[in-house]
Image (cartoon, grey):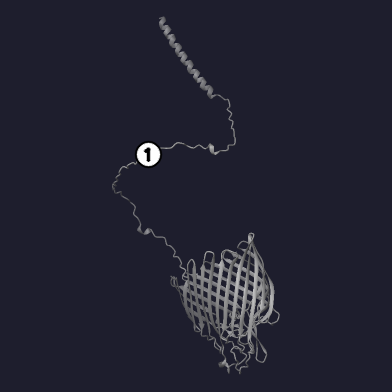
């Protein structure tokens, strides 16, 4: 009995000890969860400067097994199994994208046409170029059998021009040369109406022929102070054995100056010529002029402001009369952008000496007599200011006012009529049907305005106008100069059609005719409007047809005193464009 009780006590003691250990463990975990002692973390920041020695370089060398391994052969097979589908493709639903055809620009062309007044036209342009060489050839020939109403003399004309150009491009320079020949035939058909020439009309030799041969060369450098040099030789002659030669040499330089540059040009001109007789046939006329010109300007560009300051020096020597002239001219330009692309203000002052030649004057007026007194025109100064810009993205404008002072400005005035209508003169231009060149000191005030707009991508219209005022010193009027002229133009294209038009309006002019008895008759030239239109139809990329209508209002107006122009003129023809292989 005691042994049993002792055993039970031992078991009880063990159970109590187990419970005590479990409670102690639970209490310890509970104390850890309820511990509220704060833990402080201190961050220590210090600068660290790495060095190469700090880098760790791995010394492990991996071992790669390079033994060849034989790939197992693989075999594939496809088990075809039909799968029913409910999709039915629409064959007509796919269309290729339409690519616009690229327009081929043919540089070479031949144009042939024919018009009323017996007017044939032949024009051709050929070009061939590669990276180094470039060849150009131009041929232009237009003639007319005349037929102006109430004109007793022959009024035919012929214009022929042949030009050949060559250009060579090298790494450091480019040079080119050209040969140009022109032959122009005109007639002094403008007899004054105040005299009856019916008894001598058949004896008048009214034809004049001009021959012009020009040689030109140019050498341009990409580096160095000498940027460009040009040389020209012009020989000019006519049916009356008049001859003229002009030599021009023009080098251009560029000198660096800090971050900018100075641009300079030099010009040497030698002019020599002879007229076999003066207008009264008492002596011949010889002329020789030497002109030395030099100019330099310094351009400055700063944001919206462009400014150029410069000057010109001219020295001219009359080799026949043993006189000389030395002049200095200003050359200033300024352009300020007030609003980018919309509003610019510009102004300037310049001047210079212009050499008048028989060649240039006969181009301006082909009815001059071969008995001119040639002098240079001295443009003492020309002052101008203006505004230009855009009224919108499609409308451009330009307004300009100019005031110039010119000494020895050229004016075309009728020669004296040396015939009373019954006597025959030695030359066909002695009947008051040719022009002389007179000189006067003239101040000119010119207001100019121009506007153009591209209404649509295929429609462009525009207009410009001059309003002038002349103040003469020696002559009563600025002979044959209009105080107003304007040009209105437009271009329109639609598919294969192209249309163009120009309307020229010229104001009144004045001239004076001296009769054989010394009396003078004022000549008043009316204002006129000349409308020209043209149309082109493109058959293919190479072939096209054209039609040109001139003087649509059919007015026999006078461009020069007593010289009426042809009335309504129409010409049609074909044009072929191609590439040279």
Q: Quadrant of the N terminus?
A: top left
Q: Is residue 335 visible?
A: no
Q: Quadrant of residue 213?
A: bottom right
Report whether 28 appears left or right of 98.
right
Report whether 99 appears left or right of 217.
left
Q: Quadrant of the C terminus?
A: bottom left
Q: Position of residue 183 (x, y in %)?
A: 53, 81
Which residue reaches farthest top? 2
Q: Name which residue lies at 57% across and 91% down.
A: 204
Q: Could you say whether the residue bearing mark 1 is in a helix, strand or loop?
A: loop
Q: Position of residue 550 (x, y in %)?
A: 53, 79
Q: Position of residue 572 (x, y in %)?
A: 48, 78
Residue 14, above or below 499: above
Q: Quadrant of residue 414?
A: bottom right
Residue 317, above or below 52: below
Which residue reaches farthest right? 473
Q: Name which residue lies at 45% across and 13% down.
A: 15
Q: Name which residue lies at 54% across and 64% down.
A: 172
Between 277 and 562, the residue placed more toward the observer is 277
Between 474 and 262, the residue placed more toward the observer is 262
- The crowding category of the residue bearing disc 1, from other C-alpha atoms within 10 Å (few below 14, some 14 to 19, many at least 20), is few
Q: Which residue is mark 1?
A: 65
Q: Position of residue 495 (x, y in %)?
A: 47, 69
Q: Is residue 439 visible?
A: yes
Residue 253, above or below 522: above
Q: Quadrant of residue 10?
A: top left
């Amino acid at each position: 009995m005691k042994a049993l009780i002792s055993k039970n006590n031992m078991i009880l003691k063990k159970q109590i000890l187990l419970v005590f250990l479990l409670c102690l463990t639970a209490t310890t975990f509970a104390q850890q969860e309820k511990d509220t002692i704060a833990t402080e973390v201190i961050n220590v920041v210090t600068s660290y400067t790495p060095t190469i020695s700090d880098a760790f370089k791995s010394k492990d060398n991996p071992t790669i097994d390079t033994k060849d391994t034989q790939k197992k052969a693989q075999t594939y097979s496809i088990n075809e199994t039909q799968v029913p589908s409910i999709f039915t493709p629409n064959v007509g639903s796919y269309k290729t994208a339409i690519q616009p055809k690229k327009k081929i620009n043919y540089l070479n062309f031949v144009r042939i046409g024919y018009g009323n007044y017996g007017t044939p036209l032949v024009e051709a342009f050929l070009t061939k170029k590669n990276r180094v060489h470039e060849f150009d050839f131009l041929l232009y020939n237009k003639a007319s059998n005349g037929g102006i109403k109430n004109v007793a003399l022959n009024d035919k004309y012929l214009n022929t021009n042949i030009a050949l150009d060559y250009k060579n491009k090298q790494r450091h320079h480019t040079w080119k040369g050209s040969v140009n020949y022109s032959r122009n035939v005109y007639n002094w058909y403008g007899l004054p109406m105040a005299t009856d020439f019916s008894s001598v009309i058949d004896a008048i030799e009214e034809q004049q022929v001009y021959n012009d041969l020009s040689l030109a060369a140019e050498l341009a450098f990409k580096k160095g102070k000498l940027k460009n040099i040009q040389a020209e030789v012009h020989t000019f002659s006519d049916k009356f054995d008049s001859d003229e030669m002009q030599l021009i040499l023009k080098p251009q330089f560029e000198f660096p100056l800090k971050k900018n540059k100075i641009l300079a040009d030099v010009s040497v001109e030698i002019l020599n010529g002879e007229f076999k007789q003066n207008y009264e046939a008492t002596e011949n006329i010889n002329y020789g002029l030497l002109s030395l010109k030099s100019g330099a300007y310094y351009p400055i560009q700063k944001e919206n402001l462009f400014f150029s300051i410069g000057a010109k020096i001219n020295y001219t020597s009359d080799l026949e009369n043993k006189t000389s002239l030395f002049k200095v001219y200003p050359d200033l330009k300024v352009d300020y952008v007030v609003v980018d692309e919309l509003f610019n203000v510009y102004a300037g002052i310049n001047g210079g000496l212009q050499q008048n030649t028989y060649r240039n004057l006969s181009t301006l007026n082909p009815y001059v007599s071969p008995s001119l007194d040639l002098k240079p025109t001295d443009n003492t100064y020309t002052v101008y200011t203006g505004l230009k810009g855009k009224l919108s993205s499609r409308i451009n404008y330009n307004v300009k006012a100019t005031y110039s002072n010119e000494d020895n400005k050229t004016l075309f005035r009728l020669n004296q009529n040396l015939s009373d209508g019954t006597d025959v003169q030695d030359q066909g231009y002695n009947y008051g049907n040719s022009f002389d060149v007179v000189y006067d000191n003239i101040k000119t005030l010119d207001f100019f305005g121009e506007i153009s707009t591209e209404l649509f991508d295929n429609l462009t219209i525009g207009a410009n106008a001059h309003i002038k005022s002349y103040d003469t010193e020696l002559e009563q009027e600025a002979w044959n100069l209009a105080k107003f002229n304007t040009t209105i133009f437009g271009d329109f294209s639609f598919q294969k059609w192209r249309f163009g038009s120009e309307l020229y309006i010229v104001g009144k002019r004045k001239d004076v005719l001296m009769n054989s008895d010394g009396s003078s008759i004022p000549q008043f030239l009316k204002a006129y409007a000349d409308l020209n239109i043209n149309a082109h139809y493109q058959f293919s990329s190479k072939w096209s047809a054209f039609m040109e209508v001139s003087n649509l209002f059919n007015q026999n107006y006078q461009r020069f005193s007593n010289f009426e122009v042809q009335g309504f003129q129409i010409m049609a023809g074909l044009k072929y464009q191609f590439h040279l292989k």
